[in-house]
């Protein structure tokens, strides 16, 4: 499968000036000012301060997560959601300074989203290209495709991403466009036949089935997808141990919602002192109870840290 791109003025994509090779996400980040006041260090210290209340430490964690998403600059919706949760937690603390910082974070999130939406509209349809099936040429860069499992984009060696022209319709035509991680027309799901039996794959496919997806009957794409994503070898199982009180359920819930930390593994579980739900739909997860311990432990040792080794041994 070969992608051939064109740009205004009739230039071939391989002859474009270097700056046009920048992804849409890179150019949007250059257009959008920093989405925060860079207070992560301050609130990280607050989250680690054992003298602070549990509510204030929870608000601090949410603030750090939200600011990190906004500084990343390519996920305004996630950043706005995280900032809103941080503001809610800040209001519960009654601390006017924390509330003021969280309010600015929410405002910056709205500004970032509006600015990026405006730039996307200006940049859309500026570059595009056709997709065709041709005899394989090992050295031909436009025939080399790379799948990004995080964004769901399938990028050609020429710098364009595969896009469905009518993603909600069966047998939609496909084309290549300038890569945009926020464009749903460029979000694809490729499943390795060797991983279909994994619990994580089954669950991911079940969740994805709840959303409208594009079905495109293109044998060339199917062949490429299988060759690209087939993986052999061991798989990875991860678990976390979480107490049911303080800020830990909120932190693990954020990891689940954004599919980070252990939730990137092939299989995962969260163990706690009681059965509870963490995260929001569709990523909500029920914890497994650890029997024979309440997960509580004392502080001590040279560095006055939590003496929790017996807890983890019990879990193991």
Image: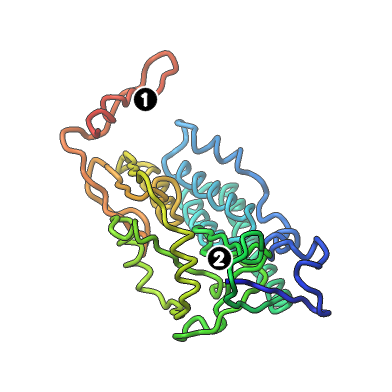
Say which mark, if any, is on residue 154. 2
Residue 310 vs 128, above or below: the answer is above
Circle 1 Cα neighbour tier, 10 Å, few/some/many (<14 / 14–19 / ≥20): few
185 sits left or right of 211 in the view: right
Classify 135 as above or below 286.
below
Q: Is residue 191 left or right of residue 40?
A: left
Which residue matches tag 1?
306
SS at mark 2? strand
Image x and y of residue 213, in percent: 43, 76
Residue sitting at x 53%, y 49%? 65
In which quarter of the view is residue 83 placed? bottom right
Task: Identify the residue at image location x=56%, y=41%.
Answer: 43
Q: Residue at x 59, y 74 (%)?
A: 134
In space, the residues marked 2 and 1 are separated at their CA atoms by 45 Å
Q: Secondary structure at mark 1?
A: strand
Query: In this orientation, does residue 281 appear?
Result: no
Neighbours of disc 2 within 10 Å: few (<14), some (14-19), many (20+): many
Foreground label between 2 and 1? 2
Q: Earlier in the sequence, mark 2 or mark 1?
A: 2
Q: Position of residue 25 (x, y in %)?
A: 67, 62
Looking at the figure, which quarter contains the C terminus? top left
Closest to the observer, 293 or 48:
293
């Amino acid at each position: 499968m070969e992608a051939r791109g064109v740009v205004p003025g009739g230039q071939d994509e391989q002859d474009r000036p270097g700056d046009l090779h920048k992804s849409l996400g890179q150019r949007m980040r250059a257009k959008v000012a920093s989405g925060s006041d860079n207070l992560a260090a301050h609130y990280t210290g607050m989250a680690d301060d054992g003298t602070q209340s549990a509510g204030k430490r929870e608000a601090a964690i949410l603030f750090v997560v939200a600011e990190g998403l906004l500084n990343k600059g390519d996920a305004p919706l996630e950043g706005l959601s995280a900032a809103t949760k941080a503001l809610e937690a800040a209001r519960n603390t009654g601390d006017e300074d924390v509330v003021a910082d969280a309010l600015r974070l929410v405002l910056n999130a709205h500004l970032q989203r509006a600015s990026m939406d405006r730039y996307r509209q200006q940049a859309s349809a500026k570059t595009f290209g056709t997709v065709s099936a041709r005899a394989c040429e090992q050295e031909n860069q436009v025939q080399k495709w790379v799948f990004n499992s995080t964004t769901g984009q399938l990028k050609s060696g020429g710098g364009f991403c595969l896009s469905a022209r009518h993603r909600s319709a069966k047998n939609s035509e496909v084309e290549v466009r300038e890569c945009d991680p926020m464009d749903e027309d460029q979000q694809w799901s490729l499943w390795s036949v060797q991983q279909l039996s994994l619990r994580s794959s089954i669950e991911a496919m079940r969740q994805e089935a709840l959303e409208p997806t594009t079905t495109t009957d293109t044998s060339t794409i199917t062949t490429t997808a299988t060759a690209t994503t087939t993986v052999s070898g061991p798989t990875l199982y991860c678990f976390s141990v979480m107490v049911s009180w303080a800020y830990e359920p909120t932190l693990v819930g954020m990891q689940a919602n954004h599919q980070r930390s252990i939730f990137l593994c092939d299989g995962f579980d969260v163990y706690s002192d009681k059965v509870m739900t963490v995260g929001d739909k569709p990523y909500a997860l029920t914890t497994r109870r650890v029997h024979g311990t309440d997960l509580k432990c004392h502080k001590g040792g040279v560095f006055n840290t939590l003496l929790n080794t017996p807890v983890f041994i019990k879990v193991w």
